[in-house]
Image: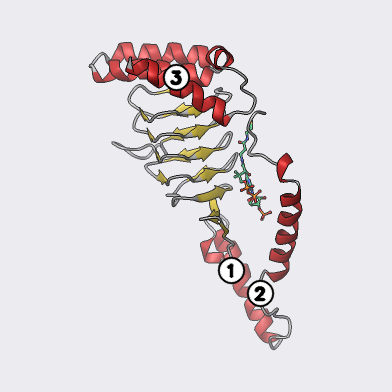
Amino acid sequence: MAWFVRIREDVNSVLERDPAARSRLEVVLCYPGLWAVWIHRVSHRLWHGHLRLVARLLSQVGRFFTGVDIHPGALLGRRLFIDHATGVVIGETAIVGSDVTLYQGVTLGGTGKGHGKRHPTVCDGVFIGNNANVLGNITVGENSRVGAGSVVLSDVPPNSTVVGVPAHIVYRNGLRVLITDPHEVKDPLSDVIIALSARVEALEERLGGEAQTAEPFTAEEAERTAYREQLDHMRQYVSMGEGI
Ligand SMILES: CC(C)(COP(=O)(O)OP(=O)(O)OC[C@H]1O[C@@H](n2cnc3c(N)ncnc32)[C@H](O)[C@@H]1OP(=O)(O)O)[C@@H](O)C(=O)NCCC(=O)NCCS
């Protein structure tokens, strides 16, 4: 009966997380992301029962029908919700916690460099937006969020939001995180940004400090605060994209 309980909680979790889902029957019939998870449970058992080729064949059948490619060796927690399904890839040594939400196009992949544990660990309650790539043996901490289209290459602390390519933290424990030191920019162009910033500082010094504002980024932060207040007024219309 345990499998029946698991299926029921899977269906209920979709109803809770997707406002577009109207009934249990609709969820069972119309959510290929759930089918993919159910097929994976069987292929994962076969994999650990040393029927590895059969397990891989079954996962390929699942991929054909759902568009989700989950390696049978991947370890998935409870109530994983893969919304819209298409194009999701989960690698062999990936570990996914419970109550995780993935949107279409998410890759939990390797960097192509590692051996052994070479895919990410995604902790409980994590949300990963569409077409985000989480690469390498890194950890995305509990209840963190990864923005759509981001490329995550290093550990994400719990309760954080990361966005961008490569991804940077924009919220941590509910507080906005602003990058004010160019050395914190992780980007192939960061050396150029650091050099430019040093040059601006040198020029400001030559101008005798007149051009310096009391606090760098004050104007930008004020603009962002005004924008967020405007968003808060419209909060009922703003979502994380659920149900689209
Ligand atoms: C990451 C996300 C959850 C953040 O939402 P939020 O907490 O409301 O964050 P904000 O909108 O305050 O954004 C914070 C900053 O990150 C930027 N940002 C947000 N999402 C981003 C993204 N995906 N890529 C790059 N930058 C992003 C914002 O522009 C903002 O920067 P700014 O303040 O300098 O202008 C959300 O933007 C997102 O990407 N959701 C995924 C939606 C999705 O996959 N939908 C699929 C539907 S089918």
* Amino acid type shown at disc 2: Val
For the residues labelled 1 and 3, say whether their Cβ atoms are less than 8 Å apart.
no
Residue at 44% in and 50% down: 158
> How was this image coloured?
secondary structure
| Mark 3, secondary structure of its residue | helix
Residue 189 visible in this rendered orientation of the protein: yes
Residue ID for mark 2 = 200
The yes-or-no answer for disc 2 within 8 Å of ligand 1 is no
Residue with the most extreme left position: 50
Q: Mark 1, residues whose alpha carbon is within 10 Å: few (<14), some, or many (≥20)? A: few
Amino acid tagged 1: Ala
**Image height of 183 relative to 7, above or below:** below
Say which residue label 1 marks: 195
Between disc 3 and disc 2, the foreground one is 3
Instruction: Name the quadrant containing residue 85.
Output: top right
Upstream in sequence: badge 1 or badge 2: 1
Q: Quadrant of the C terminus?
A: top right
Please give the count of numbered marks on the rendered protein. 3
Q: Residue 31: where, in percent of width, then height?
A: 55, 18
Q: In which quadrant is the N terminus drawn?
A: top left
Q: Position of residue 41 (x, y in %)?
A: 36, 19
Foreground residue among 104 and 203: 104
Image position of 167 (left or right of 55): right
Q: Amino acid at mark 3?
A: Arg
Q: Quadrant of residue 180?
A: bottom right
Query: In front: mark 1 or mark 3?
Result: 3
In terms of sequence position, does the residue under pointer 3 or pointer 2 come before the other? 3
Label 3 – label 2 distance at C-alpha: 60 Å
Q: Which residue is mark 3?
A: 8
Residue 144 position (above or below residue 31): below
Report helix, strand or loop for mark 1: helix
